[in-house]
Image (cartoon, rainbow, N blue to C red):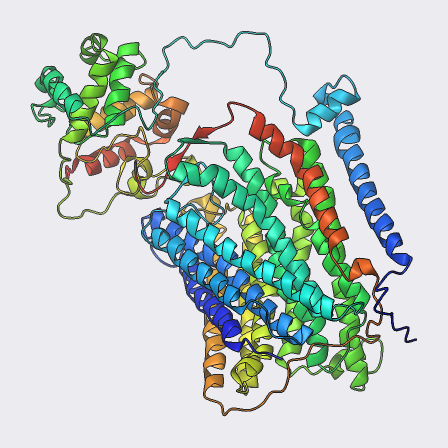
C-alpha cells in the first residue's frame, strides 16, 4: 500500500541525480591524476571536486536512499499510510536547502576540506551548516519511522513487527546515534572557528568525534542493502527467507557493534591510547559476525529458491537460479564485492596490517569496493524493484538492466583492484598530483591507468541506469499490485520481545559508546593546550 | 504450531528475560576480555615500555599523558621567532594606525621605495600581508632574523610601530602580476616535488593558495627570492617557524631556485 509515491520518488530521484553528478566528478578526478593527461597544474580544482564527490556520496546520496526506501517500507510493510507526510516533506526540503548551501561554497573553492572535514583546515561556515541541515532533515525521518512503528504496534499488540520495518527502524536508530559524533564536532568545534568566534581548534578531539560517525555511517549506508538482501531478493527470485530470526539478530547486532569501533580509523593517530585502539580493534572483529550471519542466511535462502526451481546436487543448484533476473545478478555481484571488500576490511582492522596500508590507495579501493560496489549495486536493484510500484509503469528493459549491472560490477572491480595494489606499493591517497616520471612512482602508472578505465566503465553504467529509468517513464500505465516483501520459510508467529523492539540493543549501543569513547573524549576535552591554530582554506582571513 | 498470543500479554514470555541477561552478559564479557588484553596483558608484554605495575600499564594504554621530565630542554644556540599571529592582532581598518604607519614608513623608503616599490632588489612591500611585515620586523628586532641593514632599523621600533607599519603596507595596493603574457608556472611552483618533500611554492605563497604568515612573493625581485632560498638552504636564515622553508630549500636544486625566482619576479631570463 504505497500512498506517498511522490514523496518516495522525490527522494530517489534527488539521490540518483546528485549521484550522477558526483560519479562524473569521480571519473574526472581519476583521469586528471593519471599519467594519461598532462596535470591540471592546480591542486585546488582537484580538492574542490573531491570535497563535492565525498560530500554527495557520503552524506546526501545514501541518506536520501535510506529515507525514500524507509518511507516505502513503512507504508508497504506495515500496511498503513505514512503518518507525518508533511514532516517528511519538511525533512526533504531541509536536505535540499542543506545540500545547496553546502555545495555552493565548495564550488566556489571556499570549502575544499574534503567530506571528512580535516580540522584544523577550516572552510566557509555555510558548508558545515549545510551538512548540519542535511543531518537534521534525516533526523526527521528517524522520528517518523519510530512514530509510524509505534502507531502500528498500538494497533497490532503482540504481533511480530514485519522484518523489513524492524530492520528499517534499527537502521534509523543507528544513524540517529552515529550522526551525533560529527554533529558534536561541527557544532562545538568547527562551526565556532568557521564563524571566527575562535581561532584555534583541538584537531585530535575533532578526529575522535568524527571516528564516532565515520565507521557506523558505513553500516547506515549498508542497511538498505541488507534489507534488500533479506526482504527483496528471496521474493524476486521465487524463494523464501531461510530464517526470520537470524535476520533480526543480524540487524540488532549491527546496532550494537558497529558503533564502538570507529577508532580503528585513527590507529596511526597519536592522541588516542593504545589500549582503546585495541578495544576498538576487538569490537571491529565482532562486526564481521552479522555480515557472516547474513551471507549464510542469504545463501541458504537463494539455495531454497534454486531447489524449488528443480536445482539438484551439492553445487548443481546454482545453475537452476534465475540468472536472467536483474535482482539475482545484483545480489551475486554484491556478494562477490562484499567478499573482497570484507577481506580487505579484516586487514584494515588489524593494527599491524593497517600500518602498511594506512592512508594509501588501498583504503580508497576498500571503501569504494564496499560502498560503491556491494552497497550501491543493491541501491540499483532496489530502484529497479520498487520503480514500477512508484510510477505505475513497467521497467521492461531487462537486457539493459543486466548490462548496466554487469558494467557496474566489472567497472568497480577494474577500478578498485589496481587501487588496492598500488596501495600496497605505498601510493598515498588524497594526493592531487603524482610525478610518474619519478622511478619510484613509474611502477604505479599502469595500475592507475587501469583504474581510470574502470572509472569510465562506471560512468557508462551510470548513464545506462538513467536510460533504464527514463525509458520506464514512456511505458504504458499498468497496475503492479501491492509492494510485497519476502516471507520466511517459517513466518514468525511469536518473536521474543528482545527481537521485536530495540530498548535492549539501543541500551547496549549507548553503553558501549560510553565505555569505548568516554575516556578518550573526556581526556582530550579536559586537557588544556591541545588546540592548534586553524588553517582557513580559500585564502587568508 | 500456532500459539496465538493473547493481546493482554504480548511477548511476555519468560524467555524475554533470558535474552536480556544473555545479551548483556555476552557484551560485558567481550568488553572485559578485550579490556584486560588491551590494557593489561599487551602493555605488560612490551619490555620497552618499562612499566612499574598493572596500574601503570592501564594508564599507559589509556593514553594518560606522562609527566614531563625534570630535565631542562636543550636551548638552541640561536634566537628563534617569538611571533604569535592571532586574528585580532592586526586591526587593518584602523585609519589612525595606517596613518602612523605611513609616517613611520618614511625611514623604509630609502630601500623599499617611497610607495613600497623597491628599485634596489629589496622586497616590494606594497600590498604585502600585514602579518608578514609584522612578523619579519619583530624577528629582526628579536634577532631571530639578522640583516646588517634591517636589524638597526627594527631594534628601535615599538610593538605598536611594527603593527602600524604592517597596516600601512597592507593598505597600499598590490602590484599587478608581473606576467601579463600568462607564462605557465614552472613545475616547482605548480607541483613542487612530493617525492622530495617539496610542496608547490604556490600552495602557500599565492598562485594556488595563501597561508597565514607566508608572504606574497609575486612581483618580488628575482635576486631577493634567490638569496633568501639560498639563505634558508644554508641555514643562515632560520626564522621560519617549524623549519618549513629550510626543509624545502635544502631539497631544491640551484636551477629550481632560479626557475622559481624568475617566475615570481616576472623576469623572462
Q: Position of residue B55 (x, y in %)?
A: 76, 21
- In this view, B198 is above or below B110: below
Q: Position of residue B14 (x, y in %)?
A: 91, 57
Q: Can residue A370 be seen in this view?
A: no
Q: Can residue A190 be seen in this view?
A: yes
- The residue shown at (25%, 35%) is B260
Taking depth in this image into account, of A342 and B26 the one nearest to the observer is B26
| Outermost residue toward the front in this view | B8
Image quarter of the C terminus of chain A: top left
- In this view, A308 is above or below A123: below
Q: Position of residue A71 (x, y in %)?
A: 59, 69
Q: Quadrant of residue B119?
A: top left
Compared across the picture, whether B15 is left or right of A526 comes to right
Taking depth in this image into account, of A139 and A345 the one nearest to the observer is A139
Compared across the picture, whether B260 is left or right of A184 comes to left
- In this view, B1 is above or below A481: above
- The residue shown at (74%, 55%) is A253
Taking depth in this image into account, of B235 and B22 the one nearest to the observer is B22
Q: Position of residue B187 (x, y in %)?
A: 30, 43
Compared across the picture, whether A406 is left or right of B21 comes to left
Question: How many marks on residues?
Answer: 0
| Outermost residue toward the left in this view | B114
Image quarter of the N terminus of chain A: bottom right
- The residue shown at (64%, 77%) is A327
- The residue shown at (64%, 54%) is A174
Amino acid at each position: 500500500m504505497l500512498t506517498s509515491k511522490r514523496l518516495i520518488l522525490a527522494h530517489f530521484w534527488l539521490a540518483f541525480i546528485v549521484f550522477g553528478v558526483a560519479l562524473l566528478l569521480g571519473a574526472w578526478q581519476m583521469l586528471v591524476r593519471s599519467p594519461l593527461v598532462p596535470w591540471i597544474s592546480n591542486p585546488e580544482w582537484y580538492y574542490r571536486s573531491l570535497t563535492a564527490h565525498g560530500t554527495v556520496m557520503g552524506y546526501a546520496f545514501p541518506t536520501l536512499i535510506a529515507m525514500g526506501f524507509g518511507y516505502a517500507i513503512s507504508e508497504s510493510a506495515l500496511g498503513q499510510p505514512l503518518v507525518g507526510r508533511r514532516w517528511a516533506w519538511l525533512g526533504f526540503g531541509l536536505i535540499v536547502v542543506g545540500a545547496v548551501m553546502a555545495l555552493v561554497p565548495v564550488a566556489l573553492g571556499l570549502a575544499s576540506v574534503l567530506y571528512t572535514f580535516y580540522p584544523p583546515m577550516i572552510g566557509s561556515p555555510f558548508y558545515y551548516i549545510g551538512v548540519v541541515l542535511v543531518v537534521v532533515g534525516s533526523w526527521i525521518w528517524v522520528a517518523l519511522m519510530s512514530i509510524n512503528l509505534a502507531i502500528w504496534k498500538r494497533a497490532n499488540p503482540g504481533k511480530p513487527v514485519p522484518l523489513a520495518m524492524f530492520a528499517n527502524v534499527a537502521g534509523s536508530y543507528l544513524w540517529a546515534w552515529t550522526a551525533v559524533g560529527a554533529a558534536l564536532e561541527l557544532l562545538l568545534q568547527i562551526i565556532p572557528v568557521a564563524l571566527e568566534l575562535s581561532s584555534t581548534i583541538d584537531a585530535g578531539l575533532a578526529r575522535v568525534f568524527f571516528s564516532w560517525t565515520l565507521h557506523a555511517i558505513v553500516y547506515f549506508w549498508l542497511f538498505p542493502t541488507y534489507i534488500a538482501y533479506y526482504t527483496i531478493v528471496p521474493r524476486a527470485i521465487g524463494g523464501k527467507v531461510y530464517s526470520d530470526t537470524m535476520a533480526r539478530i543480524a540487524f540488532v547486532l549491527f546496532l550494537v557493534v558497529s558503533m564502538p569501533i570507529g577508532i580503528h580509523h585513527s590507529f596511526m593517530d597519536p592522541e588516542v591510547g593504545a589500549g582503546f585502539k585495541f578495544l576498538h580493534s576487538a569490537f571491529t572483529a565482532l562486526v564481521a559476525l552479522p555480515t557472516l550471519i547474513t551471507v549464510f542466511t542469504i545463501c541458504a535462502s537463494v539455495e531454497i529458491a534454486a531447489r524449488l526451481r528443480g536445482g539438484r546436487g551439492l553445487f548443481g543448484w546454482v545453475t537452476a537460479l534465475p540468472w536472467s533476473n536483474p535482482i539475482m545478478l545484483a545480489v551475486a555481484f554484491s556478494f562477490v564485492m562484499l567478499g573482497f571488500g570484507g577481506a580487505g576490511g579484516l586487514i584494515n582492522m588489524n593494527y599491524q596490517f593497517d600500518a602498511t596500508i594506512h592512508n594509501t590507495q588501498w583504503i580508497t579501493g576498500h571503501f569504494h569496493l564496499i560502498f560503491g560496489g556491494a552497497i550501491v549495486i543493491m541501491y540499483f536493484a532496489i530502484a529497479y524493484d520498487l520503480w514500477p510500484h512508484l510510477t505505475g509503469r513497467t521497467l521492461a528493459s531487462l537486457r539493459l538492466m543486466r548490462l548496466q549491472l554487469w558494467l557496474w560490477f566489472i567497472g568497480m572491480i577494474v577500478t578498485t583492484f589496481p587501487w588496492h595494489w598500488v596501495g600496497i606499493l605505498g601510493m598515498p591517497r588524497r594526493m592531487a598530483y603524482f610525478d610518474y616520471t619519478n622511478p619510484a612512482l613509474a611502477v604505479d602508472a599502469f595500475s592507475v591507468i587501469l583504474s581510470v578505465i574502470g572509472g569510465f566503465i562506471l560512468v557508462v553504467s551510470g548513464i545506462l541506469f538513467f536510460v533504464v529509468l527514463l525509458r520506464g517513464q514512456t511505458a504504458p500505465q499498468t497496475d503492479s499490485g501491492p509492494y510485497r516483501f519476502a516471507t520466511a520459510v517459517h513466518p514468525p508467529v511469536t518473536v521474543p520481545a528482545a527481537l521485536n523492539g530495540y530498548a535492549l540493543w539501543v541500551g547496549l549501543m549507548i553503553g558501549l559508546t560510553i565505555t569505548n569513547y568516554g575516556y578518550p573524549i573526556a581526556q582530550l576535552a579536559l586537557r588544556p593546550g591541545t588546540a592548534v591554530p586553524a588553517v582557513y582554506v580559500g585564502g587568508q582571513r | 504450531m500456532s500459539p496465538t498470543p493473547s493481546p493482554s500479554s504480548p511477548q511476555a514470555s519468560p524467555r524475554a528475560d533470558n535474552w536480556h541477561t544473555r545479551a548483556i552478559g555476552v557484551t560485558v564479557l567481550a568488553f572485559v576480555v578485550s579490556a584486560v588484553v588491551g590494557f593489561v596483558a599487551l602493555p605488560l608484554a612490551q619490555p620497552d615500555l618499562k612499566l612499574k605495575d598493572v596500574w601503570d600499564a592501564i594508564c599507559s594504554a589509556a593514553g594518560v599523558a606522562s609527566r614531563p621530565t625534570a630535565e631542562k630542554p636543550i636551548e638552541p644556540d640561536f634566537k628563534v621567532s617569538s611571533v604569535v599571529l592571532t586574528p585580532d592582532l592586526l586591526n587593518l581598518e584602523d585609519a589612525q594606525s595606517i596613518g602612523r604607519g605611513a609616517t613611520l614608513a618614511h625611514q623604509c623608503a630609502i630601500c623599499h621605495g617611497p610607495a613600497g616599490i623597491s628599485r634596489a632588489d629589496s622586497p616590494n612591500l606594497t600590498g604585502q600581508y600585514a602579518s608578514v611585515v609584522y612578523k619579519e620586523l619583530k624577528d629582526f628586532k628579536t634577532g631571530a632574523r639578522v640583516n646588517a641593514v634591517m636589524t638597526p632599523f627594527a631594534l628601535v621600533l615599538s610593538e605598536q610601530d611594527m603593527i602600524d607599519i604592517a597596516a600601512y603596507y597592507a593598505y597600499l595596493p598590490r602590484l599587478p602580476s608581473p606576467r601579463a603574457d600568462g607564462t605557465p608556472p614552472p613545475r616547482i611552483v605548480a607541483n613542487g616535488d612530493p617525492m622530495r618533500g617539496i610542496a608547490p611554492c604556490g600552495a602557500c605563497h599565492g598562485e594556488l593558495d595563501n597561508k597565514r604568515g607566508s608572504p606574497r612573493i609575486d612581483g618580488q625581485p628575482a635576486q631577493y627570492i634567490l638569496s633568501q632560498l639560498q639563505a634558508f638552504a644554508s641555514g643562515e636564515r632560520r626564522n621560519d617557524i617549524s623549519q618549513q622553508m629550510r626543509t624545502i630549500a635544502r631539497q631544491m636544486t640551484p636551477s629550481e631556485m632560479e626557475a622559481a625566482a624568475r617566475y615570481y619576479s616576472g623576469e623572462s631570463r
